Image (cartoon, grey):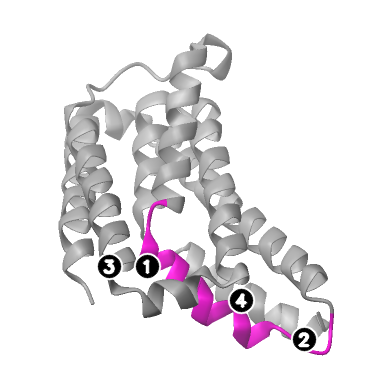
Amino acid sequence: MAIDTWIIYLMAVLALSVTPGPNSLLVLSHGATHGHRHTRWTVFGGAVGFFLVITIAMLGLGALLETSGNLLKTMKWLGGLYLVWLGIQTWRTPLAPILEASNACKTDRLRSFHQGLLAAAFNPKVILFFSAFLPQFADPNSSLIHQWMVMVLTFVITEATVEYGLAMLANRVRPWLNRNGKRLNQYCGCLFAVMGTALPLTK
């Protein structure tokens, strides 16, 4: 990938990463509840999810989803139901003391990883977006594999950095969170539920 094309791609990825979405809300909620060290597992799960989404988009599943209305509808409903479930779980999560990663049990780490993974990968709108977004930066005269490596690494590293920054921000405002953390979880839970409800209704 040419350096000027990569710079434009990086700027687009930065703009996309700072746009509020399911993963950023999840990371912010986990950072407030568990601390930024434990939230690394949520960020890691999201990174793996986005890696899979970009790979699928590059393989052409986006074109399949656009032409198969039933498949798209099914994925929208499944993704929407998961977001609603995640919203309910986030709403019900009590404000707990911020934990260090070494004190978090393995089960909690795996749960956070799975939540980050599913929030990133279980969204057909993301697959469709990348299917339309990535070809704009692809050079048909160059190796598609090499371009895929550059694009997927650029996006995953940028997104993970932004998400971890959100987790650290949530950790730094702990005094405010001690007073309003439950409200933050409820707010994030409502947003998850709204996104989950709206997702199956979008065209």
Front disc: 2 or 3: 3
Q: Nearer the viewer, residue 44 or 74?
A: 74
Which residue is at 53% across, 59% downward? 53
Q: Quadrant of residue 6?
A: bottom right
Residue at disc 2, secondary structure: helix
Q: Nearer the viewer, residue 173 or 73?
A: 73
Q: Which residue is mark 1?
A: 125
Residue at disc 4, secondary structure: helix
Q: Earlier in the sequence, mark 2 or mark 4?
A: 2
Q: Is residue 180 left or right of residue 104?
A: left
Q: Earlier in the sequence, mark 3 or mark 4?
A: 4
Q: Are marks 2 and 3 in contact (CB under 8 Å)?
A: no
Q: Which residue is mark 4?
A: 11
Report the amino acid beneath label 4.
Met
Q: Where is residue 40 drawn, in percent x and y?
A: 55, 34
Report the amino acid beneath label 1.
Lys
Q: Where is residue 121 drawn, in percent x and y?
A: 46, 52
Q: Which mark is residue 4?
A: 2
Q: Where is residue 149 drawn, in percent x and y?
A: 76, 63
Separation of residues labelled 3 and 4 (CA atoms): 35 Å
Q: Quadrant of residue 4?
A: bottom right
Residue 124 within the magenta-colored segment of the rendering: yes
Q: Where is residue 92 drawn, in percent x and y?
A: 17, 27
Q: In the image, is residue 171 above or below residue 50?
A: above
Q: Which mark is residue 70?
A: 3
Q: Earlier in the sequence, mark 2 or mark 1?
A: 2
Separation of residues labelled 2 and 1 (CA atoms): 28 Å
Q: Are marks 1 and 3 in contact (CB under 8 Å)?
A: no
Separation of residues labelled 2 and 4 (CA atoms): 11 Å
Q: Is residue 82 left or right of residue 63?
A: left
